[in-house]
Image: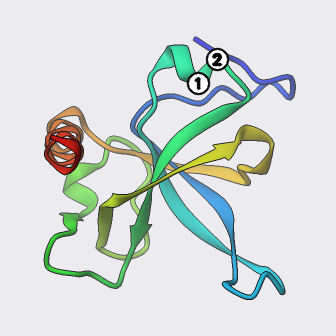
Amino acid sequence: MIWTRGGMRFEQREIVQIPFPYSDLSGSKKRPAIIISNEKVNGSSNVICCVVTTNPHKIDIPISNRDLEKIPLPFDSYIKHQMLFTVNKTLIIKKMSKLKQKPFNKLKERIYENIN
């Protein structure tokens, strides 16, 4: 398991809260994201994530509290598998939940389809 210098470790499938900048870069808003990178990548200073939203498009993957191992999210949500990004772990505000393995496998399949 990988630990940050602050003592917090991050694992694949965890849903975390991070600051997303406004498009004009005037500020940011706290939003959830799911960590998709593996332990090897998570051992670096960054993690790879997908956006999690409550505003779906038809290609997004729906998730509900049934799909989570830990603390429920306040709303049914959707994973934007086409929106990948890298974030420095120091920007992660908190852990929110963790996606179960079966829906995560579906997410990995969709990401693979996006690049295949």
110 over 22 or under it: above or below = above
Q: Which residue is mark 2?
A: 43
Residue 104 x %, y %: 24, 40
- In the picture shown, does residue 42 fall above or below 25? above
Q: Which residue matches tag 1? A: 42
Looking at the image, do the residues carrying marks 2 and 1 touch, with CB atoms under 8 Å apart? yes
Instruction: Pinpoint residue 86: horizontal percent, then vertical percent.
Output: 59, 45
Q: Nearer the viewer, residue 64 or 87?
A: 87
The answer to which image quadrant residue 82 occupies is bottom left
Residue 4, picture quadrant = top right
Amino acid identity at mark 1: Asn
Image quarter (top left, top right, bottom left or bottom right) of the C terminus: top left
Q: Observer-nearest residue: 14 or 27?
A: 27
With 9 as the anchor, is 13 left or right in this view? left
What residue is rendered at 58% in x and 24% in y?
A: 42
Q: Residue at x 50, y 28 (%)?
A: 11
Would you call the spot at circle 2 few (<14 residues within 10 Å), some (14-19), or many (20 or more)? some
Label total for image:
2
